[in-house]
Amino acid sequence: MKVYVYFALLAVMSLITLICFAVDKKNSSKEGRGRMPEIVLLTLTTFGGAVGAMIGMYVLRHKTNPVTKFHFAVTAWLSLAVQAALGVLLLLS
């Protein structure tokens, strides 16, 4: 049962994260539109939204500049590794 709850949480958080990345991408090209703070995107990525962040980064091509947005890639890959490891641990227990 714990496994289903964990993967459902990851799915919901990833969807929310992907939506936030898409909204931020849309607003980035418009002057005067409110942008999503980077800390919000990074927090969502860390707390369950790594898959959604990866999709947002590489499919939507948002926050992928290796010079200025390196911290997004590092956070997304580390969070994905931790979330996958926790999923494997739950599956094995």
Image: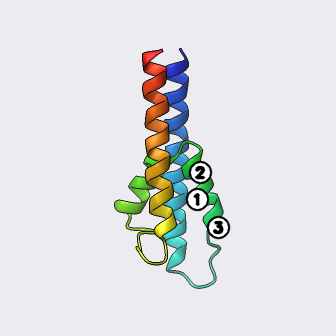
Question: Please, which residue is most extreme toward the left here?
Answer: 59
Q: Is residue 36 left or right of residue 71?
A: right
Residue drawn at the location 41% of the way across and 61% of the way down: 57
Residue in the foreground of this view, choosing between 74 and 42: 74
Hey, what amino acid is under mark 2? Leu
Sequence order check, earlier mark of 2 and 3: 3
Q: Secondary structure at mark 3?
A: loop
Q: Which residue is mark 2?
A: 44
Hey, what amino acid is under mark 3? Pro
> Which numbered disc covers residue 41?
1
Residue drawn at the location 49% of the way across and 40% of the way down: 82
Residue 28 in the image, given as x and y percentages of width and height: 52, 76
Q: Residues within 10 Å of mark 2 (few under 14, many from 20)?
A: many
Q: Residues within 10 Å of mark 1 (few under 14, many from 20)?
A: some
Q: Which residue is mark 3?
A: 37
Q: Are marks 2 and 1 in contact (CB under 8 Å)?
A: yes
Disc 2/disc 3 C-alpha distance (Å): 11 Å
In the displayed structure, 88 sits above or below 15; it is above
Residue in the foreground of this view, choosing between 35 and 79: 79
Hey, what amino acid is under mark 1? Leu
Residue 86 in the image, given as x and y percentages of width and height: 49, 31
Q: Are marks 2 and 3 in contact (CB under 8 Å)?
A: no
In the displayed structure, 6 sits above or below 55; it is above
Disc 2/disc 1 C-alpha distance (Å): 5 Å
Residue drawn at the location 42% of the way across and 26% of the way down: 88
Residue in the foreground of this view, choosing between 15 and 39: 39
Residue 85 in the image, given as x and y percentages of width and height: 45, 33
Q: Secondary structure at mark 2?
A: helix
Residue in the foreground of this view, choosing between 91 and 19: 91
